[in-house]
Amino acid sequence: MAAIFLKKFSDLLMIPCSFIIACSFMAGAESIASAKNDTITIKDAWVRPSRVENSAAYMVIDNTGSTLDRLMSAQTAACERVELHRIEKIRGFFRMSHVEAIDIPAESSTVLKPGGMHLMLMKLNHPLKDGDKVTLELRFDKAGPMTIQAQVRSASVPKKDDSASFVRQSQNQRQGRKEIR
């Protein structure tokens, strides 16, 4: 009788113990994966809707680390390839060009936005519509790979605060101050 009681009691203990062990393993695995990206944070990631073969992804990349990092590449199953791009004004004309990497300076933010640096999604596999989600894998020089989800949405109209910020940024550029945008 005591043997049957002990067997049932040990079986009951095995369930919570197994659950605790499994949870501990998963937590450990998550902390190992996120440790590579502990200095890089992605905020406000979104992708422009598109019925044609190309689109663009935008986001804010924060580097809380003490050294410069670089966004080296990106990929997604939503398109054939992703290129890092920037738009610059040259002699009064806007020009989009491919860049090898995007610098993410230490203890600062880099903004990927319409009219500036962005990820160009080339040869989409299907149209992207408002509300869809796109999974992007970003590869950083030091932080390594990082997977994010970006929502497909139309560009929002700037708020008064945003336009005031844009005016200050433009004034800074005219005064020769360097800005990461």
Image (cartoon, rainbow, N blue to C red):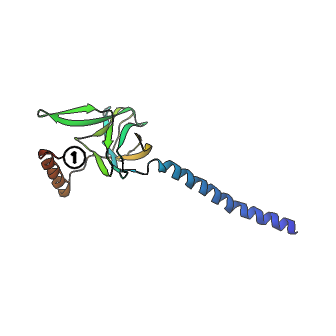
Q: Is residue 59 above or below residue 21?
A: above
- Percent across and percent down for residue 67 are 36, 47
Out of 175 and 45, give the one closest to the viewer: 175
> Relative to the observer, which residue lies in front, 132 or 21?
21
Quadrant containing the C terminus in the rendered view:
top left
Question: Which residue shows up at 77% across the image and 66% down it?
Answer: 9
Count of numbered tags: 1
Q: Mark 1 — residue?
A: 179
Query: Is 86 on the left or on the right of 144, as rendered?
Result: left
Residue occupying the point 56% across, 50% down: 29
- Horizontal arrangement in the rendering, residue 13 relative to residue 139 (left or right): right
| Quadrant (top left, top right, bottom left, bottom right) of the N terminus | bottom right
Find residue 120 and report its horizontal and vertical position in percent: 32, 35
Q: The disc labelled 1 sits on which kind of residue?
A: Glu
**Does dot 1 land on a helix, a strand or a loop?**
loop
* Image spot of residue 101 (x, y percent): 33, 36
Residue at image coords 63%, 60%? 20
Q: 131 or 25: which is nearer to us?
A: 25
Residue 154, position as x, y percentages in the image: 28, 46
Q: Please rate how many residues cluster around mark 1, counting C-alpha atoms within 10 Å: few if below 14, some from 14 to 19, many from 20.
A: few
